[in-house]
Image (tube, helix red, strand yellow):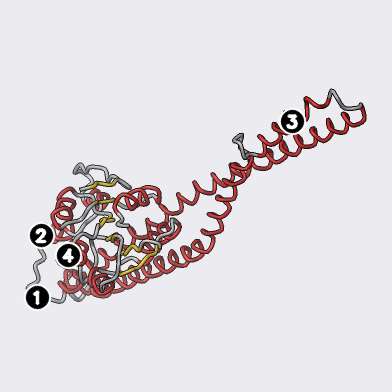
Amino acid sequence: MAQTILVIDDSASLRQVVAMALQGAGYEVLQAGDGQAALALLDGRKIGMAICDVNMPRMNGIEFVKAAKALSAYRFLPILMLTTESQESKKEEGKAAGAKAWMVKPFSPASLLNAVSKLCLP
Amino acid sequence: MKPTVPQSQALVDLCAAVLPVWARQLASSRHQSELAVTEMLSAFAEIGPHLDKASRQSGQITAALAQGADGITQLAVACDQELRPILAGLEAPAAAAVERALAMVHASVDALEQIAKPFAHETQMVSEQVERMYRGFQYQDRISQMMTLLHEDIERLQAAMNTPDADTNVAVWLARLEAQYVMTEQRHQHNPAAGHAAAGDDETTFF
């Protein structure tokens, strides 16, 4: 069965680009426009990993990582931060929150899939 | 004719009229570009699986022609090896017929290779262009972020103009705007004189 990846970004076009890259490699994709919508989508679902933007309305990416990690079912959910933000202080914030990796946009599909293959749970 | 109101008031009136228009135009442009890119992506999503299929088929053809044990090229060589030794024992018309058959096999394999090589090259070219398109589409996200920031700052300026005790300290205003940047190029454009480390696009840091 294909692994499911949750993609969280407030830009619909960016979500679509990520989804296309993942679906082309055989992954199932769930999409959410911000952290709050992503939390609602989790709802006990089996998720292989999450790919999350940082700057989003309502609930940003760092807040989402903290909130997801606080849920026992998703304590070990690998989260890749995919963002235009490249400042080291922000990366440290993501790491402290519990993110597993940080990728700066724009990404190439090959790099994204390489990171996903390393992080995604079976 | 001299203005009947002080110049500062005239400027305030001008800004009060112009800023909302700028803000609306920016918001509209951002919305339109987002729609256009989403539309292009939808079309691309339809083409994508066909390109993948063509690429896979190209790989299969190349594999089928490969020199390995199952390859067509190897099959032609095997035919040659099997039939050549018995040619000497055949009567002339039969030997000639086998020679012709072998020549036809080799010609067919050569023809297949000539077809497959450019096909593999073309699918490689398509795959490289697809990679470029993936990156190109993502710039919409960067433009959209900057437009949103400008839109919000214009609205904030507009609100400040209508608030008598608004903080209009230039340094404070610019610092607040700068604090909202997330991309290296935004920081660079804000203050080109300051050095900014180049953004490592596509760079992954594993924790």
Residue at mark 2: B172
The dot on residue B164 is: 1
Pointer 1 with pointer 4, Cβ within 8 A? no
**Residue type, label 3:** Glu
- Quadrant assignment, res B92: top right
Q: Nearer the viewer, residue B30 or A5?
A: A5
Circle 1 residues within 10 Å: few <14, some 14–19, many ≥20: few
Residue at mark 3: B82
Residue at mark 4: A63
**Residue type, label 1:** Pro
> Pointer 4 indicates a residue of which chain?
A
CA–CA distance between discs 2 and 1?
A: 17 Å
Label 1 SS: loop
CA–CA distance between discs 4 and 2?
A: 27 Å
Q: Is residue B196 left or right of residue B203?
A: left
On whether disc 4 and disc 3 are found on a single subunit, the reply is no
- Residue B21: horizontal and vertical position, in percent? 31, 73
